[in-house]
Amino acid sequence: MRRLAVLLVLGCAVAVLLLGSGAGGGRSYKVRAIFDNAFSVIPGEDVKIAGVKVGKIASLDITKCSGPRLPMECTSRDAQKAAVVLNITQPGFDDFRTDASCTIRPQSLIGEKFVECTPTQPPVAGAQPASALPVIPAGEPGAGQHLLPDTQTKLPVDLDLLGDVLRLPYRERLSIILNEFGTGLAGRGADLRNVIARADPALQATDQVLKILGDQNRVLEDLARQSDTDLAPLARERARVADFIGQANTTAQATAERSADLQRNLERFPPFLRQLRPTLARLGAFADQATPVLSDLHSQAPAISNFIRQLGPFSRASTPAIRGLGDASAVGRVALIKARPIIQDLRAFGSIGKPLAANLAALATSFHDTGGVERLMDYIFYQTTGVNGFDAFGHYLRAGLLVNLCSSYATTSAAGCAANFSKASPSSTRGGGATPALSRDQLALRRALRASRARRLRSLPRRGAPRSAAAAVGQAAGGGTPAPPPARGSGSTAAGRPTGGGTGGSSSTPGGGGGKSGSGTAQSPPSTGSSAGGGSPNSAMLSYLLDS
C-alpha cells in the first residue's frame, strides 16, 4: 500500500510538472521501444505519461536480428519484433531511465491506440536511482535514439480478440490448439513458463501485485481484522451512508459543472500560497509574542471563571432594571419624537451661532490674557469707592481730573497710551512722560488757578472785619472759622489728598476714599460752591493735581 501511495504522489508530481512547464519546441527526445506486437498502432498516435500528452509516435519499424553481428535492439537471433519510435516533445519528460516501461493501450472503442509510458519507477529508500536509457550507437538501426528493450514493454490483449476466441469456429479451434499444445509442450515447462511470463502483461502485473501483497501480509491481516470493527458502524448507519453517496453524487455533478472555475482556482492556488507564506510567518511571530499573554491568562483562568459564575446572578438582578429601562424608552421615544423640532431649531441655532461663539471665545481669551478681568474689578472697586461719600445733605461724588500724557488729543499713537489692557503696563501715571504740549497745558492751568485763588483771597474779609451773611452761613455750616487756602501737603478739602484729618478726598488709588474731614470743612452743601479754602472743589482739585 505504501507503493500505491508513492505512485499517487509521483502522478501528482508529474501533473504539476506538466502544468508548470509550457508546451514548447526545443530538441526532441526519441525512444525506440521494442514490442512483441504493434497491432493497430499507426504513426501520429499520442504518447502519454500519467494521462498527459507528451509526444507522438514518430514511426514504426521491424527489427532485423540476422547476420554475423546482432544489433543492440535484438535479444535473440532471427527474432522479428515491432520497433515503435516515440518522439517526446514536452519539456520535463525527456529523461527515461533503465527502469522505464511502456504499454500500448486502446484509446477508444473504434480501435485507436496510444502508448502510455512511465519514465522511471518510484524511488526506494536507500537505493540508487536508475541510470539513463542507453543510446543506440552509430551504424545500427535507430542510431542516436534511446533503446527501451522488449522486457520493459507490454501489449494487453484487446477485448474484441477475447470475444472472437469464444465464437464458433474459433472456440473449437482453440480447444484443438490447447490439446496440441499439451502434446507439443510436454517436457518444455521451463520454456513455456518464460513464454507465459512474457506473453501476457497482465500476468506480469499480477505477479507484481502479488509480490506487493506478500510484502504487506501483516498489514492485510490487520486490515481484515479491523475491517469488521470499522464496517460495523457503517452497517448500522447504512441509510446515512446511502444518503452520503447520493449527496456525493450531487456534489460531484455540481463540481463537474464548475470545472472551469475549479481549474482557475487551482491555477491561482500557487500564487495564493506564496502570498500566504509571509502572513503565516507573521502569524507565527504573533503566536510567539502572545504566548506570555496566554500564560498569564491561564493563571487568571480561575478568577475569570468565578467572574463568569457571578455574572449570572448579576444578570438576573439586572433584569428588572432592563425591563424598566424598556418602559422608560417607550416614554422617552415619544418625548424625543416631540422634541425633534426643538432639536432641529437648536441645530440651526448652533450652525448660525457658531461664528458668534468663535468670536466670543476669541474675545474672552483676549480679555483674560490681557488682564481685562483685573481691570474690570479695579473699575468696580474705584467706582464704589468714588460714590461712597456721604454728608448731612446726602451722597456726593468724588471726582478727579487726570492730567498726563494721555489726556490731550493726539493723531499719532504715544507710548503708554494704548487702549488695550495689559498686565505689564500701569493704569496711569501722574505727570510721567511729559511732552511740550502737556507742559504748556499744565502751565496754563496753573496760572489760571493762581489767578482764581488770588481773586478769592482778595474777596475774603480781613481778620476782625465784619463778615457777610454768606460767610457767616458758611462758617456755621463748617463748624469753625474759615481755614486758610490749602497748601501742598496740608489738611483735606472736598477733593484733596487725605491726611491725618481723615478728609474724604478722592484719587485714582484706593487710598483716595475715606471718612469725612476732621474739621468739618467738607460738610458744606455742594450748591454753595464753597470749600474749606473758600473756592470750588474743582479748583481745589486742579490745585492738587497741578501741585502734584
Image: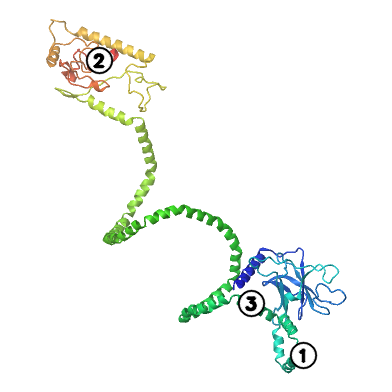
* Quarter location, residue 109: bottom right
Residue at horizontal 53%, vertical 55%? Answer: 281
Q: In the image, what residue type sits under mark 3?
A: Lys
The quadrant holding residue 165 is: bottom right
Which part of the image, by quadrant, shows the C terminus?
top left
Query: Do the residues bearing badges 1 and 3 touch, measured as CB atoms within 8 Å?
Result: no
Type of amino acid under label 1: Gly
Residue 246 appears in the rendering: no
- Residue type, label 2: Ser
Q: CA distance from mark 2 to mark 3?
A: 143 Å
- Look at 64% across and 70% down and name the residue there: 11
The residue shown at (36%, 35%) is 365
Element type at marker 3?
Answer: helix
Q: SS at mark 2?
A: helix
Choose the circle earlier in sequence order: 1 or 3: 1
Residue topped by disc 1 = 184
What residue would you read off at disc 3? 211
Residue at image coords 42%, 53%:
293
In the depicted structure, whether residue 133 falls above or below residue 114: above
Q: Position of residue 413 (x, y in %)?
A: 41, 22
CA–CA distance in space, label 1 to label 3: 32 Å
Pointer 2 residue: 539
Residue 276 position in % (x across, y down): 55, 58
Q: Is residue 541 above or below residue 383?
A: above
As measured in the structure, the alpha-carbon distance from the residue carrying label 1 to the one carrying label 2 is 171 Å
Q: Position of residue 329 (x, y in %)?
A: 30, 59
